[in-house]
């Protein structure tokens, strides 16, 4: 059952002439060939993933000769060391070693365990730069530097015990943080010295990384950069298809708190994608509307370079996924104008809290985009909509969305007033606003239900979802329950 | 970024020789060619969708030469004006202008914004006729002409405020109606005069449509016809694949109130579709059982013309999707024989309410199909099942379904008796039977949970769904909760 | 509409020369040809399914000439009667007639209705043997021979009535058992004599099977064997694609009680499968990692023969799906070491109950695998993980899982302590621990919520699901609700 002979390791530093080696790219660097010579046996999954990737077939200097619109690299000139070999193991895992606390000696090479956005900048600087200003890039700090969100996280995921019929909250473990909130937001990866591990190639020494593995969007890497490109371009395929289909986004953006995926599935756009998406091209650059795809996926509206068949750009590529979003519709009690900056923990509202609105929905306007920027972002989105829908259709669609934002905010306000009543009557203790029964009812009234309604409204679909599944029904029923909860205890 | 020069518009009335124009069909009418000459730039998404459609490649007079079983048009003779050109923009958007309140002058042509079933009748009269008698065609009136359903809608989706610790219901807005209940059922589209809008081609004047856009199945159109063919044959592709896959149906028929999609996904039929459906043919007419597909989707049992390989018809095409359904299992407290007519608001039960049963399950038999019609419909469905299952299998399957209808109706009756008790003891006020906590518990006992069990039973699957997800577990737990709710407040 | 002439039946015993007959395999036995001659008209769905199957194209004696690693049959020598014809209707439906209570005379042949694992052993003995020792093979008895599970089933699915504001439980019907719990677990199929049925071929006599149709994994067949191979290899396609895709498993292993499917969909593995799985090969034997597939489906980790491109075996095929599972994480209050045997109802814990732990989580260690076996199973799983992930990654992944098992067990213990309090204070009656409101709250605290967290932790994914959907949020909120429920009633 052992799939490799120990002798392979001894002979490791030469390019193996095993059957599969014939598929290995000739244009790989000597270093990458050496990586492959062992890893094709030890971790064939990674190697074959890479072998089908564009990276394994692309020589950057050749890639630069493409017309600008078709280019996947955004650096006008690529470092000579990287320019004339395919993008292999060593090209990515050896960059900027001085910055990488996770750099270690590995069979004669100095290797970084974690490839970071700062490394990807060698060919893709524009993408990294755009990303770095987004809320995603700050997803870790936006939780951990905001005391309210930190408290919410702790309250939910801490293990509890019962003492004297009281629920006592323990401390949330790092393990559980990593597989819940910080699974999507990202962890802070530190290097705790070196450790010895047993592998099929015998005992080797590797950096001991804390809070690893993790591919959260805001991950803080051992080189102190923020973000994990692999969150959306997974593992070693670096596939556009992966990032353009919806499943990558759906790992984090789904019900009950961010029901974008659920709403899309039930929308007409989703209907068409699921019925005919197998016939579309998810690899072309630019991505041609009408030819390559017939209905948008997440990436069409929020990220990709979209053109028409004559090469006219309908929508610019961006890796700051906030850049066509004018209202933020999830994660906070009230929908509100999008924050100006990605690191939202710097916000201070009139209650002196790091939130974009007060408890009763007064916006912290200094920290939020103004109506001019809002209109500009909306206009950019509408231009894309109009490639398939009439101007009137698009206008009426977003009028409807504006109404929905107002009505769902009203519903949150009503729930908040009931919570204030409960606090006022000492039926709950406001020192932790998230841990008691009536408080958890309130949290659902803003964190779960209105989001569905807003997403469905924004993304043209999901009437049943909005009415019954996780929207108006829940909002109305739970409001009634909050009222009754108070009433029953007042008596 | 502007993707079209203003000069294009000036030169608009000639067939553009742009790169993509070579793909435009030669057999289009002169009018359609003119539409395309601008819209390929302004709304390329629509045009490319159409270019891949059968409409863009079909000349009706040629289509009529096919053997009858293979025909997609049901009119024996097509109007001369339409017969010898492909089915383009102008052919559909210019019909019956005198009936269309949404007809308007558009660059020299008289154009209808909304193409209606009455227009589609030019080639597909049988489909429109069948559809027109169905519950779907009356989906708007079945809500808005039934005071009880109107009250349920208002109760759920009205924005609420808190006054003196009371939940006060505001008035449901048209915008929210349109994106919830009437998103599936359809809106009444009216023309409120003309309005000027800014487009990429400059300012133009268009009809100002109320409650638009909408593709609900019962939409009342500006020509007063009912229905939206685009609900299931979306936009300009008019694709059989779209309608035969399940995602179109799943836009409205999903949990918690109509969990057909959810149940299908977990059934053996769904399992086979998801595993191997990518190898099937969703375009052939007739649709050949065993060859084109291996397991049914919604359309197989409820709509499509199904034949065996020798052209023997196994099941007739119908656009009255009620026609093989004998028991109605959702949307009303008790499962009951299917109503005789599509406009169900005409029903009067012994309580003098427009519902097919009374509060305690006495059927309004005069308005419901009798046992002969029920048996006939069941027999038609069974014939199709028997193409893959033995007669005994099929018989036992529907015996099981009969039992499920009885047991789930028992559970609804139990919940109803508890509600009567609550009303009797003045724990709730029956003037609006949908707005208080115990009433909303009761609504879920008929609108959500029994439906899952009945759908799963009818559609051969989803045991886990039925047991734990949205079926028996919920029914039994919530019944206990209703009882306790009353008990706690009686004290 | 009748798709067959009565004369066909008269002429039934000859191989029809109808159009489709040309596709019928020449190498079928004479008996099978006779079956097909009628059934291609009566049940074309079954016949065409089979015609695309490997069975219809495979002559066992030829199949045996393949290299061992590529073989799909595990018997070294096949009975002469079966060896030289394709595997057709008669080959499977005529085996071991003396054991089959469902054997009957059918147009001159002696036919079994239900093909059982014991019949499949004619070519696939290793698979049947492995399966027979698994928990799946004992899925019926594991419910029906365990009085606690029997009580849980009855409590949930029995029809209820209201008498004097009490919820009165009726008796659960066989029909409902069959479409809920025993839909997945399997039924006991008995033969209640013969019955006459009307078919398109006229009246025929067939065995009258009770609790049929059913494809539950532990089905007890009329020949007294246990299991239904068709549960995962549905109907007459016997497709590897069906079994290797996830939808077969997802029929039973889904939320809220066994959320493997839900968690997979949101994991990175699932993301990659959904984005690119359409390009993979689901038919090859052995199944080559990296070449045939890029991310695991259920079968990769739990069932299939996995090799690398050079034919080195990475993981052995097994039909005992327990064999690489060391901790059981669902279906019982606490996660615990996997039971030693498949028939878990033999277990006795220190409370003298047939459960693997006591009420307060003391394990029934004599019946559970010890730490050596646990480590060995974990090591086997890890070897497969390491084909794509570094040793360190894999080690840290399972450390995290260990922590999750501990924390979720703590949460179950907290809920159990509250239940004990409620019983102690006579707020509920422990004679049936599943039927009262506080008891049903407790059941959800172990049957639904912790499982999601454990599955997500084990299967590398679903942080949002774990945090908010059906995990920590629910566990924490419902614990608070249990506490308040008691508090409110104590006063």
Image (cartoon, coloured by chain):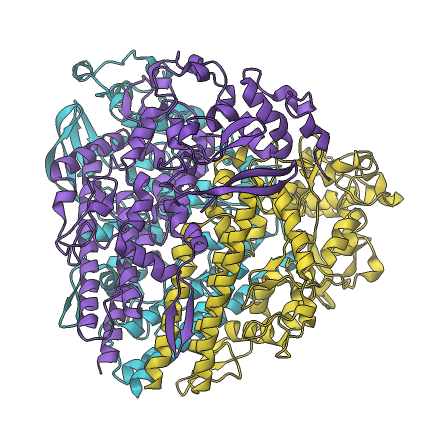
Chain colours: A cyan, B yellow, C purple
Which sits in the foreground, B185 or A326? B185
The residue drawn where x is 85% and y is 43% is B76
| Residue drawn at 16 percent across, 40 percent down | C369
Which quarter of the rendering shows the C terminus of chain B?
bottom left
The x, y position of residue B93, in whole percent, is 77, 52
Identify which residue, B69 or A347, lies in the foreground.
Answer: B69
Quarter location, residue B105: bottom right
Quick one: C118 or A213, which is closer to the camera? Answer: C118
* Relative height, residue C465 to residue B342 (above, below): above
Residue sticking out furthest to the front: C193
| Residue B200, position as x, y percentages in the image | 66, 52
Looking at the rendering, which quadrant does residue C171 occupy?
Answer: bottom left
Q: Quadrant of residue B5?
A: top right
- With respect to residue B129, does A26 lie above or below? above
Q: Residue at x 29, y 83 (%)?
A: A489
Q: Residue at 78% of width from left, 62% of height from top? A: B223
- B127 displayed left or right of B151: right
Can I make out residue B65 in this image? Answer: yes
Residue B57 relative to residue A150: left or right: right
Residue B374 rendering spot, x and y as whole percentages: 65, 57
């Amino acid at each position: 059952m052992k799939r490799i002979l120990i002798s392979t390791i001894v002979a490791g530093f030469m390019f193996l002439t095993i059957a599969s080696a014939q598929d290995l790219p000739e244009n790989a660097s000597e270093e990458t060939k050496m990586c492959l010579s062992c890893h094709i046996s030890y971790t064939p999954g990674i190697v074959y993933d890479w072998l089908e990737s564009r990276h394994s077939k692309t020589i950057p200097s050749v890639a630069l000769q493409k017309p600008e619109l078709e280019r996947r690299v955004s650096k006008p000139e690529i470092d000579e060391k990287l320019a004339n070999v395919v993008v292999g193991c060593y090209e990515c895992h050896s960059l900027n070693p001085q910055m990488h606390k996770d750099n270690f000696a590995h069979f004669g090479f100095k290797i970084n365990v974690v490839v970071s956005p700062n490394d990807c900048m060698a060919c893709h600087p524009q993408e990294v730069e755009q990303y770095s200003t987004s809320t995603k890039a700050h997803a870790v700090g936006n939780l951990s530097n905001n005391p309210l969100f930190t408290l919410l996280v702790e309250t939910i995921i801490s293990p509890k015990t019962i003492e004297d019929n009281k629920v006592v909250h323990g401390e949330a473990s790092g393990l559980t943080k990593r597989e819940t909130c910080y699974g999507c937001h990202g962890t802070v990866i530190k290097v705790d010295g070196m450790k010895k591990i047993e592998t099929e190639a015998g005992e080797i020494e590797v950096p001991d990384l804390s809070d690893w593995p993790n591919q959260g969007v805001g991950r803080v890497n051992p080189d102190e950069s923020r973000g994990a490109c692999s969150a959306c371009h997974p593992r070693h395929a670096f596939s556009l298809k992966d990032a353009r289909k919806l499943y990558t986004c759906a790992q984090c953006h789904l019900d009950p708190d961010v029901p974008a995926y659920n709403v899309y599935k039930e929308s007409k756009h989703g209907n068409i994608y699921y019925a005919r998406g197998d016939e579309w091209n998810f690899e072309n650059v630019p991505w041609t509307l009408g030819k390559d795809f017939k209905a948008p996926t997440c990436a069409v509206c929020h990220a990709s370079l979209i053109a028409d068949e004559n090469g006219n750009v309908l929508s610019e590529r961006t890796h700051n996924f906030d850049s066509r979003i004018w209202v933020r519709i999830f994660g906070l009690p009230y929908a509100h104008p999008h924050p100006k900056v990605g690191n939202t923990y710097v916000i201070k509202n009139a209650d002196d809290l790091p939130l974009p609105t007060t408890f009763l929905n007064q916006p912290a306007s200094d920290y939020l985009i103004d109506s001019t920027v809002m209109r500009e972002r909306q206009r950019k989105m509408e231009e894309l909509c109009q490639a398939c829908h009439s101007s009137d259709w698009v206008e009426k669609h977003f009028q409807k969305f504006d109404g929905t934002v107002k009505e769902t905010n009203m519903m949150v306000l009503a729930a908040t007033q009931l919570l204030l009543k409960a606090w006022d009557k000492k039926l709950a203790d406001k020192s932790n606003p998230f841990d008691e029964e009536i408080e958890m009812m309130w949290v659902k009234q803003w964190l779960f239900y209105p989001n569905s309604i807003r997403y469905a409204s924004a993304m043209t679909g999901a009437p049943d979802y909005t009415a019954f599944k996780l929207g108006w029904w829940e909002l109305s029923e739970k409001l009634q329950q909050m009222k009754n909860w108070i009433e029953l205890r007042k008596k």
